[in-house]
Image: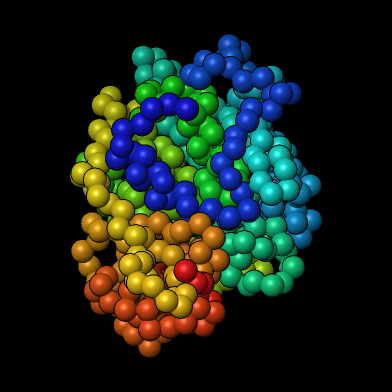
Amino acid sequence: MRQRAPWRWAIWIAALVFAAASWRLAIVPSPHAPVSPAGTLPVAVDHTLPASASISFEPTAVEERLRDEVRYLASDTLEGRGIGTAGIDLAAEHIAEEFAAAGLRTDLYDGKPFQEFSVSGRRGGRAVKNVVAILDGRGPLAEEAIVLGAHYDHLGRGGSGSLAPGGREIHNGADDNASGTAVLNEVARQLAARQGDPCDPCRSLVFVAFTAEESGLIGSEYYVGNPLMPIKNTVAMVNFDMVGRLRHETLTICGNESSPAFGPLLRDLGSKYGFRVREIPALFGPSDHLAFYTESVPVLHFFTGLHKDYHRPSDDFEKLDYEGMRRIVEMSTELVLQLATNAARPEFANPFGDLAGMFSPITSAMARTGPRQAFFGVVRDVDHKPAGFAVRRVVTGSAAEKAGLRGGDVIVQFGDQPIERSEELTPAVRAMRPGERVQVRIERLGTQFELDVTLGAR
């Protein structure tokens, strides 16, 4: 594994601990999946793109394609796209076919688009794969790349990470993240269809459907460690995760402060396509862009917000806003074209400054002796200034993790106690007993909802 600066390790640790306790990051290349050395591409061959005349980009046609794709990816046939299921393999094959049909080059790993490796957990090792394709650049910028990504896995039949604990229903994950996968595929079609437009010089565009995001950003971390093109030549990463529930025209984009070039561009394009762009700094929103951010790659994460069906079996394709998704496709396509053709690469910025001392674990009277006390299991983000208790990370196996809290959440109420200052959480936890249940209201990416927590003991 590569050496990282301490602040990058700190951000990465803070994001990864929300992963399910049943999985650990033990990534091993599959013996039947030869991988080129990092940054070494297979030799490009001439290939003819499909005639764009055969593909309609009229709004109704695009929306129908998005709907059809989400309907398939979020169908019971795909078993919730859980790790180790036949359904997630069907999803990977489908994405590979869509990439090839769009005109992307997919002969990247032993003639296929599958970047295969394995993850280890309590049930032993399981083979997983990212799906990778490329639209080759032109001219002197071709050696630089923009990565566009979306995770295609979900929760299968629930378990750890589900907000409907105890059941065995299929979690179809229409918004999370069949929506992002469908948008990724449609952006690929539209960018490939514009291959004939003047685009010289033009950076290479790498499309990655990531696996095992729900298990802890495993697929994106593996890709960053084994990139198709060198990470140092990756000028930006655009991530689509949960983009199917547009409300009040509000489009949340995380990462605007990871490059000074992003803010004005996002505001201009947001206005052009009818969005109220809500900008959030780079660290927040635990998703696949974080693996790139910790390697000093400017990132953008498109997101339309949480909802009552999040991580529940009720997240179904009928509830998505396909007109909103189509406009996200159009805005993203124009954004990527500008990033791909601008002479200057976006400059990376770290909006969080010095993160030394970022970890301040919340403990329950550690110095005291006597009966066991209630334990919640969150770590405070000491850099957070607004009201509430900002969670930097969640302790593995704790009550907080089991209830579904993640790094980046802000706790605004614990039972009957409003949490206006971070110091108010510890006394609220101490006042309760192990095994007691409490409703915890959190804010995640601008949306508030409640989690049912059964407190642990220490």
| Residue farthest front in this picture | 369
146 left or right, relative to 108: left
User: What residue is shown at x 56% (from left), y 41% (from top)?
Assistant: 25
User: What residue is shown at x 53% (from left), y 53% (from top)?
Assistant: 19
Q: How is the image coloured?
A: rainbow
**Is 101 located above or below residue 78 in the figure?**
above
Q: Quadrant of residue 261?
A: top left
User: What residue is shown at x 20% (from left), y 44% (from top)?
Assistant: 353
Q: Quadrant of residue 360?
A: bottom left
Question: Quick one: 167 or 402, which is closer to the camera?
Answer: 402
**Is 96 located above or below residue 141 in the figure?**
below
262 left or right, relative to 15: left
In this view of the protein, can residue 373 be seen by the observer?
A: yes
| Residue farthest bottom in this picture | 416
Q: How many marks?
A: 0
x and y percentages locating residue 245 in the rendered image = 50, 65
x and y percentages locating residue 57 in the rendered image = 55, 45
In this view of the protein, can residue 150 be seen by the observer?
A: no
x and y percentages locating residue 420 in the rendered image = 25, 77
Question: Quick one: 294 or 415, which is closer to the camera?
Answer: 415
Question: Quick one: 406 or 39, which is closer to the camera?
Answer: 406
User: What residue is shown at x 27% (from left), y 52% (from top)?
Assistant: 358
